[in-house]
Image: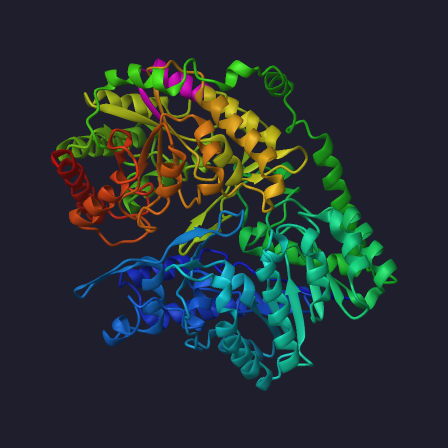
Amino acid sequence: MLTQNLGYPRIGSQRELKKSCENYWAAQTTYKNLLQVGKNIRHENWQLQKEAGIDIIPSNDFSFYDQVLDHSLSFGAIPKRYNEVILKKGNTELDLYFAMARGYQKEGLDIVAMEMTKWFDTNYHYIVPEFYKDQHFKLFSTKIIDEYYEAKQLGIVTKPVLIGPVSYLLLGKEKEAGFEKIDLIKNLLPVYLDILTRLIALEVEYVQFDEPFLTLDLTVKEQQAFTFVYKEIRKAFPHLKIILATYFEGLENNLALATTLPISILHIDLVRAPQQLNTVIEALNDQIILSLGLVDGRNIWKNDFEQSLNLIAQAIAQLGEDRVWIAPSCSLIHVPVDLANETNEKNLTPEVKQWLAFAKQKIEEVVTLKNLLENQPSAIALKKLELNQLAKQNRATSQLIHNQLVKNRVAAIVEKDSSRINKFPERKIKQQALNLPAYTTTTIGSFPQTPEVRSWRAKFKNGSISSEAYDELIATETAKAVKWQEEIDLDVLVHGEFERNDMVEYFGEQLNGFAFSKNGWVQSYGSRCVKPPIIFGDVSRPHAMTVKWTAYAQSLTSKHMKGMLTGPVTILQWSFVRNDQPRSETCTQIALAIRDEVVDLEKAGIKIIQIDEPAIREGLPLRKLDWQNYLNWAVKAFRIAASGVQDETQIHTHMCYSEFNDIIHNIAEMDADVITIETSRSQMELLDAFANFKYPNEIGPGVYDIHSPRVPKRAEMVHLLKKAKAVIPEAQLWVNPDCGLKTRGWDETKRALIEMVEAAKEMRNN
């Protein structure tokens, strides 16, 4: 029996990669230094897994920004707007790579970034490949080969990890009409064969192909592409040990396809789909090894050793020990690096900490499961089993987890709790008293969190400054932001959120039932890392969370100040969620807490309240058959949060990186008075869904991309607004950026928002 890992966090245990990348972009460190940081992280990851006892260690799971973008560069899938131009300017291959991810605006060039969207139903974002009819692919970057060789030079034999050819194409987007992206499979496959030829020349034994689309609904053509690809790979390399990795769901209607492909090892996710084990075993031929994804790669709870050992025993009984491997369910990039870094008991109490496992601990769990299956398990392994069972029992009986008052309140919810007093047309008439102009301008909520602002928060948390001094600093910064917004003539203002860290963490810190790590960072996209809260118990709101600073900001202006909240589904999706009750139950508890905050904001005189729900779309189950159940409780949770106010109070929501076509009626059912969405990278394409549906409420299509440092010109925004006006009545249109501005600098923010306000005024005058 062997153990394998599918991928390890690449940010570094202290976010070294984030810091180095951002310093490089700011010209504060050299290209050579950045490469060295990447190399150090790779070497540490490989050595850690080797010393822990993992038998099959991954390479090419490291990335400076995103693994999908890595593949696009490797395959020469570089949009023409970048091709050669940046390299001719004397920049490196890595600069080209970063330009594809972030855009490029210097040396007289102004090149927009590639689109970004969510990786399946996770909070990780990937850079979307761009495909064209009859596109040609070639080996452009040798990263995959180089990193395998790098590990080999250290004496560590790895398995290169590649996104499988079919999944890579399905992750992309057709950028012109007249073809389907899967039609490019015959053009793409030769590059894979070239890479494999080079790897085999270096004596590679195993190669992992990630094909998560095997857990989704596939067309006949897509299924045929899988058969074609793996037959061709097997024909070219008859002795290569092919690991086919599936995850995030069960194989279900793709079971026969996956189990008849000419592969050596099939990996399945038994955390998300434990019920598939027997059917997969029955479908396997007598040659394929089965890799059991038992340790949760997406959540931070300890593995239940007893349950996992039962599943392993079940597999061994039918397949034999030699045909069973043990692994995490998926790559560990979705969990923090090391629980040992959590030394602050104020943030994470020993009782809660004993229930958790981060990436390093999950690697140890995989190896411990193998050790426990030996004929005579070591005393160390048996002690780990004993401690695992004790932690499980403690969690089941802990007084920290259950609050009967919360459970009673959820049980008492009735239909009117999830409905506004009147329908939108009647509310809109009453909301005319807000006296807002056509093409109302606003922002999504946050303003830049400068190093100075972050330092204030750090000093306050460690006791270096008093709460009074901290409040004075935040009040001054808030007042400056309000004054500046008035100066540029924004219509609906925000207070800037200078007192907040992360849009989910800030609320979780003030809610019962949440715990927090100090160093539990997880990559969201590029250098953007988040520290997801840990929902371990029943959720309730002990006090108002945002009223103080919102009301203060409103007192500084005669314009409307938006109250800014994070919605229940997003708090759920962007947290590590307890796994001892249905997610819908936890979401409803959060919804009631947010409802209380909405009501308190209204009482404080706030007439416009935004409840952000960027994670609604990403929460969809991967198979459409399961969508409606999720959408029923997710939409209801938002409505519970939003429905405690009078008709005159305008409720906004914000969503980003969402394909809305297939759930547009559910978005409408949320019944927000105004929805703001990300549309600039897609050039307003996402608006088609709202137009075709005849979306009745108001909508703010983002007119510039905040995930790129480039500052768009007024004419560019006017062009996008005219495209929006062509499909959405102008009486419904708002003007805003794609997302919050927390990660941007003040200089670019100010220049962009001034251009945005002027673009709105130009539209009013047309």
For the N terminus, the image quarter is bottom right
Asked if 191 appears above or below 689 in the picture, the reply is below
Would residue 743 be visible to someone looking at this image? yes
Residue 682 as seen in the image, left or right of residue 155: left
The residue shown at (35%, 43%) is 678
User: Which residue appears farthest toward the left when viewing the image?
Assistant: 765
Residue 18 in picture, x, y percent from top left: 40, 57
Q: Does the magenta stretch include residue 83?
A: no
Asked if 614 appears above or below 587 in the picture, the reply is below
User: Which residue appears farthest toward the front when viewing the image?
Assistant: 178
Residue 613 in picture, x, y percent from top left: 44, 35
Query: Which of the 4 image quadrants contains residue 546?
Result: top left
Residue range in magenta is 596-609
Q: Compare residues 441 and 632 and report the one nearer the observer.
A: 632
The residue shown at (35%, 73%) is 93
Q: Compare residues 399 and 110 and report the one nearer the observer.
A: 110
Q: Compare residues 632 and 367 and report the one nearer the observer.
A: 632
